[in-house]
Every structure is written in C-alpha cells, then in structure tokens.
Image: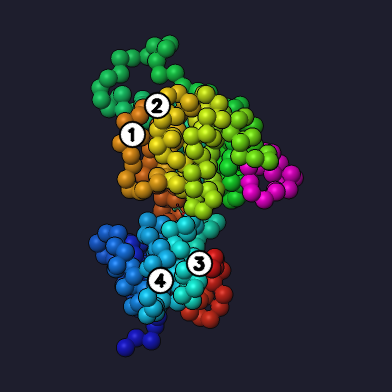
C-alpha cells in the first residue's frame, strides 16, 4: 500500500501538472473528463485524502453531511470558490484552497475582448461574413459604439478589477470609476487611473461600460437586476467575467431586447453550461464559454498553485492560498 496521500482530480488538467501530481501523490485522474455527478463527489470525499475540484463542480452542504468524510483538503482549481459550501467543508474539518493571482491578466484580457467585441459588434460582423451575407462597405453599416475616451465602471476592485482599469485607462484613455465594498486608498486607485465611488448605483449611472469583477454568490447574487439595469445609460454595455449569478439573466434578456442597455459581453452564466435561448438569439450580446483563464500559461500556473497548496498541506505547512 502506498504511503502517499490518495488524491482525486475531478477533471482533466494540463498534462504538465498531472505529471507533477502523479510524481508526488497516489493519484486518481478523471481520464474521460466528464463532470462528476453529486453522488460520485460525495463518495470521493469519503475515499480520498484530498479532492481537487474545479469551478464547474458543485459541492453544496449536503455533500458533507452524514459523516464518514476522509478528505482533509479541497484544493480548488480556480480562484472563485462559490461552488463550494465553505462553511460546511470547514465544519467537516476540511481545508479549502484556491488559485489567486495567476489568472488576473488573462481574465482582464477576456473582459477587454468582450468589451471591444460588443461595442464594435464583432460577433455580429463575424456571423454576417460566415453566413455569406455581407454586401460590402457602406457608411451606415453595422455602426457600433466608440470605446476610446469613454467611462468604464468597475464593480469589485480586486486584482482583476484593477487589471481591467489599467487596460482601459492607460490603453484606451478611459475615465475609470469603481465600486468596492471596502475603501481603496485614493493613491492606490490612481495607480490604475481609477476613482472610487460610494455605491454600485452611482457607478451604473455614469458608466458607458460596466465590467463586473466581484465574487459570485451571497449578497452579490442578482446584484445586477432589472432595477439596476434601468439605472444604466441607455447606450451602455455590460461585461461579465465574474460569475453568472451576479446578473439576473431574465432581467438582462429583457433589458437587451427592449433597448434598456445597448449590449452585453458575457463569459459566465447562471447555470453553466446552459445558456438561455433568450440570450443566444440576441445579436447585441457576445457570448463566450467561460474562457477567462483559458490560456496555456495560466491553466498550467493554476494547476501548479494547487500542487503547491496540497504539497504544503501534506508536508504539515500552511497552504499559501487557504480560504478556509
Ligand atoms: C476562476 O478561477 O474562478 C475562473 O472562473 C475560472 O478560471
């Protein structure tokens, strides 16, 4: 019998990271990369010393109920951990870690991609060409919104919010305002060309583009609802690379259909991988399949962060990215 900790990875990870894991631990990999159902995850918590889930796995409180838990750590592959009931994990004496820092730039890059794509109608234009429907250049064809010099409103001024501010202010001459739950030192905000406002509503009212960078779940669920969408400028665009549940999707669909706001760029959805048909039929929305961190460099770095966390834990050291 191996004396190494027995560890389950719930999805395929980059090969380089799986190799390191296999060198250090007694591993079980999910070779076919199919999402594990709740009962299999519950069973895994009872069979393995560590389970390494990712943001598409659901670990609600009931998975930890009923005793017999063997797992001592959940090394989450991802910075967001609202898919894990952290209080229930803690009550079951399970440590939870995440992967902050390494996906900041790539997630901000995707937010910028969505902002530009929706403002300049890139998705629509691409669809038109692919359908063979483009009839040629003309002065009134597919007119979008200018980005340079406009006002960006950021909700959540953590690492990714700051990286987005930096791109927009220094790259696109945008005025940047933000809402953040805790106060940010004005000099620190100024380093990113940004200025803090007191409320979400104040940000929504002045921004031409609103980009969401707050955690999902809890009090942020449906933070952007029908009332708040109505506060936005009529020509404004919403970008969401945070979590799907921050936005009330049916309310957003209505707002996009009725011209309450001009467009939206979305990388995340409330019930992934299901994207409501009401969104899929709209031309004024750009939809990406949760690609924020999807670059080779970042996905390997995320995996290595998990390796560092579980290695520290099983060596008896404090995991560097412990969240519970
Ligand atoms: C995260 O890490 O939380 C992202 O949503 C996926 O990379």
State whether residue 276 is above or below residue 300: above
- Dividing the picture into quadrants, the one containing residue 231 is top right
Q: Which residues are magenta?
A: 179-196
Question: Which element type, helix, strand or loop, lies under badge 3?
Answer: helix
Q: Secondary structure at mark 1?
A: helix
Callout 4–callout 2 Cβ contact below 8 Å: no
Q: Which mark is residue 278?
A: 1
Q: Residues within 10 Å of mark 3 (few under 14, many from 20)?
A: few
Q: Position of residue 235 (x, y in %)?
A: 52, 24
**Residue 64 disc label:** 4
> Can residue 225 be seen at all in this image of the molecule?
yes
Q: Residue at x 48, y 79 (%)?
A: 314
Q: Is residue 170 visible?
A: no
Identify which residue is drawn at 38% across, 67% down. 62
Residue 113 in the image, given as x and y percentages of width and height: 46, 37
Q: Which mark is residue 257?
A: 2
Q: Which mark is residue 87?
A: 3
């Amino acid at each position: 019998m191996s004396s190494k900790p027995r560890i389950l990875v719930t999805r395929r990870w980059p090969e380089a990271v799986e190799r390191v894991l296999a060198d250090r631990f007694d591993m079980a990999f999910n070779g076919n990369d199919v999402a594990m159902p709740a009962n299999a995850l519950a069973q895994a918590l009872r069979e393995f010393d560590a389970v390494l889930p990712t943001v598409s796995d659901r670990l609600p409180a009931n998975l930890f109920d009923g005793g017999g838990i063997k797992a001592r750590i959940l090394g989450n592959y991802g910075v967001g951990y609202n898919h894990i009931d952290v209080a229930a994990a803690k009550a079951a004496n399970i440590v939870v870690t995440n992967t902050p820092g390494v996906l900041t730039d790539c997630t901000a890059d995707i937010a910028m991609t969505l902002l530009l794509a929706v403002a300049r109608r890139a998705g629509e234009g691409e669809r038109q060409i692919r359908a063979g429907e483009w009839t040629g250049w003309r002065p009134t064809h597919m007119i979008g919104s200018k980005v340079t010099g406009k006002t960006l409103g950021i909700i959540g001024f953590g690492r990714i919010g700051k990286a987005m501010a930096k791109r927009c202010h220094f790259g696109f001459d945008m005025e940047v305002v933000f809402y953040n739950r805790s106060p940010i030192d004005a000099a620190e905000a100024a380093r990113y060309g940004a200025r803090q406002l007191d409320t979400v509503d104040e940000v929504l009212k002045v921004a031409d583009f609103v980009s969401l960078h707050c955690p999902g779940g809890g009090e942020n669920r449906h933070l952007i609802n029908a009332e708040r969408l109505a506060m936005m400028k009529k020509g404004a665009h919403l970008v969401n690379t945070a979590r799907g549940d921050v936005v009330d999707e049916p309310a957003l669909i209505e707002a996009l259909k009725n011209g309450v706001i001009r467009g939206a760029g979305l990388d995340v959805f409330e019930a992934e991988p299901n994207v409501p048909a009401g969104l899929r039929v709209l031309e004024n929305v750009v939809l990406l399949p949760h690609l924020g961190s999807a670059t080779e460099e970042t996905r390997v770095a995320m995996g290595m962060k998990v390796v560092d966390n579980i290695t520290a834990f099983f060596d008896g050291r404090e995991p560097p990215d412990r969240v519970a």
